[in-house]
Image: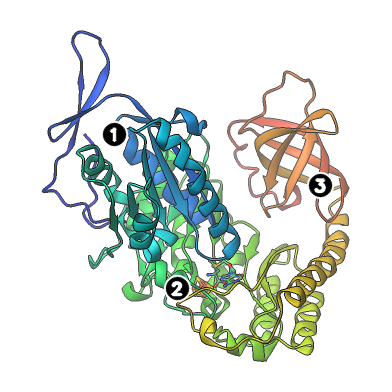
Amino acid sequence: MSELNPTGLGLRDSSGPKEEWFKDDSTGESLVRMGDLVFPPRKVWIKTFGCQMNYHDSERLLSHLKNLNFTQTEVVEDADLVLFNTCAVRDLANNKFYSHLGNLKHQKKENKGLVIGVGGCVAQTEGKDLIKKYQHLDFAFGPDTIDSINDMVFRTYAGDSKFSVNSWDRSSDFSIDTKITHGTPQAFVNIIKGCNKYCTYCIVPYTRGKERSRRLQEVYDDVRKLVEYSGIQEVMLLGQNVNSYGKENNESLAELIMKLEDVNGLELLRYTTSHPYDVSDELIAAHGEAKKLSRHLHLPVQSGSATVLQRMNREYTPEHYLGLLEKLRKANPDIVLSTDIIAGFVNETEQEHQATLDLLDKAQFDFIYSYAYSERSKTRASRWEDHLTDDIRGARLREIQAHQLKIQANIRAKMVGNTYRILVSGSNIFKGEKKWKGRTNCNRIIHFLPETDEQNLKWHWADVRVTEATALSCQGELVKDWGRRAPKGESVDYKLW
Ligand code: SAM
Ligand code: SF4
């Protein structure tokens, strides 16, 4: 039987039909009964666009669908159910989704039993139109309804397709337990949903709704269980604006981080994404005190110009932002910082653009994610007349990226000769050789050769000495393989990270 979430990311209540597993006596096959339907083993193919939050939501969808006898397939042609988890933040991901969806028309023609659903942020705002426009689409569902996926899939198999659900979960608490479907030691743990900030360019408050936080004790118990029962060693706390976590309950991110320090077996704690406005002194202090907290912080600035930040409704100035970096570096001299930049915001002047290049020089980020401004309907900025052309936007984006690469190359060069402890996550072929890779505590990826070709280092902790580092890649050599568990008592040796 699947577990029910009374107040989670969804609207599922206890009144509908529930999944029940049973064995077919004649074939020995495991089947699931839900209401008057029997679900044989089926395959689901899921395509995720966008941020870590969406990847986390997809994992949640998969974990529910397991209870309905679905297993995941990587081959879309083998699928009985196709799901898209969409992102509406920028045009690019949006366009990719539309082209994928269009391509499925032929597959549905050949396989009439194929069920196709669209979830996520695009479905929240455009679900009804999508259903009308795409004949081969069966259902659409917003991000706040994902815990009801089995009810929606049941509904389509019961013959009621062509529906869209984009309701908000209005229960007072945000309460869930983390579901993982993978066998890795890393888990995403959602601590806050929605966003109240209404930056003038951003669609998120319209697709993910108002901020609501889980209670601190619930998150603590959830993480403890993940570590104890599922062998999780690294946790990423997730939310659109994790820095405002707990406000409605008089709790805070800093408090949560410090509390998670005493989860035995948890090696590394990360969090994303942050808004500079809500970075408190307590949080800065936690970056100096918490031994398990990653020494990397992603703190999106968006622009280096005070006037652009004002038009973006970001509620801070470049000076305030740089002041935060200074305090963070004082609290933890080893901290590594990164950011997001939007190039060519509405009517950005050349002078405003130069201010961003200037901020990059001052901030010395380890890396940046940068995007050309993409107009999103419903947002305030989309209603303003905009004189900037896409060509100028593109040129400014390239200039920002080239400028940052120079800064980054200098910073990364300092890694050469240092030994870092990494959690090895996989391998690739690099110039004809198989190399393993993993992330350091401060979120830098290092590639390295194994001692022998047969050596399987996946999800091992390894100490790796950096031999070569450029702006975009870091090569190293294996110093020590610790196996699947981080060595006890040495996990806080700063020289190794
Ligand atoms: N909550 C985070 C914050 O306050 O910065 C960011 C979350 S947002 C979903 C991720 C990134 O997408 C933003 O930091 C911003 O750089 C980018 N982004 C959001 N809306 C955008 C737009 N309309 N055009 C270009 N980039 C955008
Ligand atoms: Fe979007 Fe982040 Fe601003 Fe919220 S804080 S509106 S998620 S950019």
Residue under label 3: 474
| Residue drawn at point x = 19 percent, y = 38 percent | 158
Query: How many residues crowd around disc 1 within 10 Å: few (fewer than 14), some, or many (20 or more)?
Result: many
SS category of the residue bearing label 1: loop
Amino acid at dot 3:
Cys
Amino acid at dot 2:
Ser
Near-viewer residue (115 or 330): 115
Residue 329's image quarter?
bottom right
Residue 164's image quarter?
bottom left
Above or below residue 432? Residue 91 is below
User: Residue 218 location in percent, x, y?
Assistant: 32, 56
Residue under label 2: 244
Amino acid at dot 1:
Asn
Does label 3 or label 2 sit earlier along the sequence? 2
Does label 3 or label 1 sit earlier along the sequence? 1
> Is residue 194 at all visible to an observer of this figure?
no
